[in-house]
Amino acid sequence: MHGSEEAMVGFQGARRIAPSLRQAAPGIAGGVALLALLLLHAVLPRPFERLELFGADTLQRMTPRGAGAAPVMVVDVDEESLARHGQWPWSRTTVADLVAALQDLGASVIALDMVFAEADRTSPSRLVPEWRQRFGFGAVPQDAPLPDHDAILASIFARGRVVAGFAPVDDAIGRAPDGIAPFAVIGRASPDRLLRFRGAVTNLPELDAAAAGHGSFSLKAGTDEITRRMPMIARVGDRLVPSLALDAVRVLQDEDTIKVRADDTGGITTGYTVRVGDIDLPLDAEGALRLRFPAARSTATLAAWRLLDSGKRAELQDRVRGAAIFIGTSAVGLSDLRPTPMTAFEPGVDLHAIALEQILTGRHLIRPAWAPGAERVTTLLLGLGAAFVCLLAPLAVAVPVAALLLLAPAVGAWVLFAQAGLLFDPTLIGLGILVAFAAAALVRYAGVERASRRLRSAFTHYLSPDLVAALASDPDRLKLGGEAREMSFLFTDLEGFTAMTEATGAEALVQLLNAYLDGMCSIAMEHGGTVDKIVGDAVHVMFNAPLDQPDHAERAVTCALALDVFALGFKSRQNASGVAFGTTRIGVNTGTAVVGNFGGKRRFDYTAHGDAINTAARLEAANKALGTRICVARATVEKVSGHAFRPVGTLMLKGKSVGVDVFEPVRHPSAVHGAYLDAFDRLAVGDEAATHVLLDLHAADPHDPVLALHARRIRVGERNVRMAA
């Protein structure tokens, strides 16, 4: 016995747990989907990286870096400069004139985004001996000293403040220039993460020896070929080398050494801090600087041809004095145009200038080493929050809350980017919220749909499909309570039902009545009516509840006419088979009623209460005295435009001090209809002549029940349209 009791307790506990699991299923589904997303992010990061880059690029475009106080300028060998001074490469004397002009105007540092790896073939020191050997042409005495363009350029470099560029390459050709500034390294500069090259293309030895600094002009593009970072330190062979912008900072600061500190976390290099003079520069684990871009093509630029025009140099002094200058090219044919988050065509030299300005102003873009972990935790928390909001709140509330949760990381990332220069990825967090909420919503929707199907299946046989659909979509309507609203009501009754029950067997009666009621209810539902009750053979239908139906009066009259056609046909078929099936009488009225769920907590009924309903029921009963099959109140007629009516009279209902004007629908109005309306209006005001017209109309159509009614009343001395009912 004791074991049986334990089994029963366990069974009851399982029954309690099952509904709880079903209720919690949306939250569980959201949590599982979220964990799956985070696992996928850890195992297959590449698609998420592209999404992260898209988010970062969007932040750059939304909030470009403003112009800093540091004077940085690009001297551009543009298309017009090439047109004026010849195609590239220019003679070294032309380059020397350009650099000398900048030195004379007071440039603080001059960095060349170009390399002079071969001797200038236009130098007289090379051309004259070649002419003498090949053509026997002696332009000058054989022992006369000849100018050397490379030496001229080297002498200009030697005047100071010039940083020569070089190109690291993956081939083992050449090595880094000997004059590269030394590095003082604290910690370990991980060779596995730093950008590494096997060799370098450098300038002629005399040019490198004369330069004050040397920097790599290598650019680091992403997997999508978009440049977002610039390597500040790299390796050529086993030697650390600075970028063009970094060595320009060193020369600008009059420093001899570049200090590098490796930042380690758990034995892993997470980044570097580079110090040049009093400037600290944060780099990532690959030794690259994350560029914080200004607006597209906003770098201060000066065309090279203007500096080469000696007559225009003086007017440029205010722009050049004290500025850090990069010399490069934007000419399309020289292939130094790079895509960035801001534009598809940014000259490479502009990127070096952007980096230098960022270094000098200190307005860096930093992605902390702990950012990925913080993003995963935030994704988990907000994703679970979205899932459980979907679980606990109505969808009308859950969707806006989820939207706010989705907006929060995007706004937070933007604020941190704009105000603090911190880069966080809102895309993973947003994706986690979407995935968790979508999974929870789908499971919840599936549960609601199952419940709705069960509800529809259970109640469609009893209620209007519209009512069932309304209750399924909004179960709160099943709560007790009601509301006052204008509605139209239709009541039907079957004449002679009691006598028919006595003459017909029970089984046959049930089949007959079911067939009749099925047809009546189907027609009512087709017209949007809610079948309120079926009492014996009577059907009560209401319009404009639970769904709003602005044309409820029109629907009620149209439904009444359709019911009348069906009932006449059904009666005719039954009479033909020997069953004494009676006439169906219909009453229609419009008015204000209170509609809703009435009853108790254990059982309640969706119905309506009010005087308008009682009036509709009494109009149905009044058909017997009036001789009509359909009786419609004026309150309904006044709201209907698609049907014709004829007035029958003013019914003085028991218990009411004001009569109810009643009408009969007319399917096919004729000339007689107009005559009747005129006579009725005259009779209503006591015109004796109207009685003769009505009697003549009755004589012409003795089978018309309304004309017969008025004829009887006239013959007994009635001269008005008021009648008791």
Image (cartoon, rainbow, N blue to C red):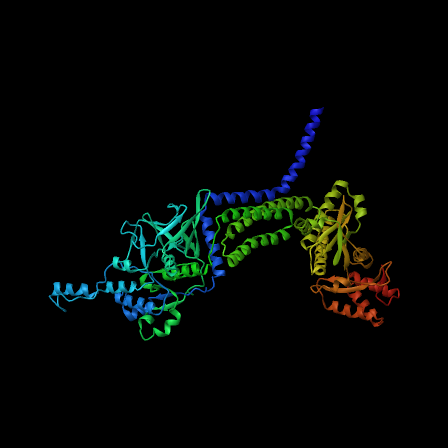
Quadrant location of the C terminus in the rendered image: bottom right
* Foreground pick, 434 / 350: 350
* Foreground pick, 239 / 118: 239
Name the residue rendered at 20%, 66% in the picture. Answer: 147
Residue 2 at least partly seen: yes
Left/right of residue 598 with respect to residue 58 in the rendered view: right
The image quarter in which residue 120 lies: bottom left
Rendering coords of residue 176 (x, y %) = 30, 52
Spot the residue most to the bottom. Answer: 311
Left/right of residue 655 with respect to residue 132 in the rendered view: right
Quadrant location of the N terminus in the rendered image: top right
The image quarter in which residue 328 lies: bottom left
Rendering coords of residue 694 (x, y %) = 81, 67
Spot the residue most to the right. Answer: 717
Q: Is residue 77 above or below residue 446?
A: below
Spot the residue most to the top. Answer: 1
Rendering coords of residue 706 (x, y %) = 79, 62
* Foreground pick, 502 / 310: 310
Rendering coords of residue 219 (x, y %) = 37, 55
* Foreground pick, 624 / 465: 465
Residue 586 at least partly seen: no
Name the residue rendered at 27%, 51% in the picture. Answer: 173
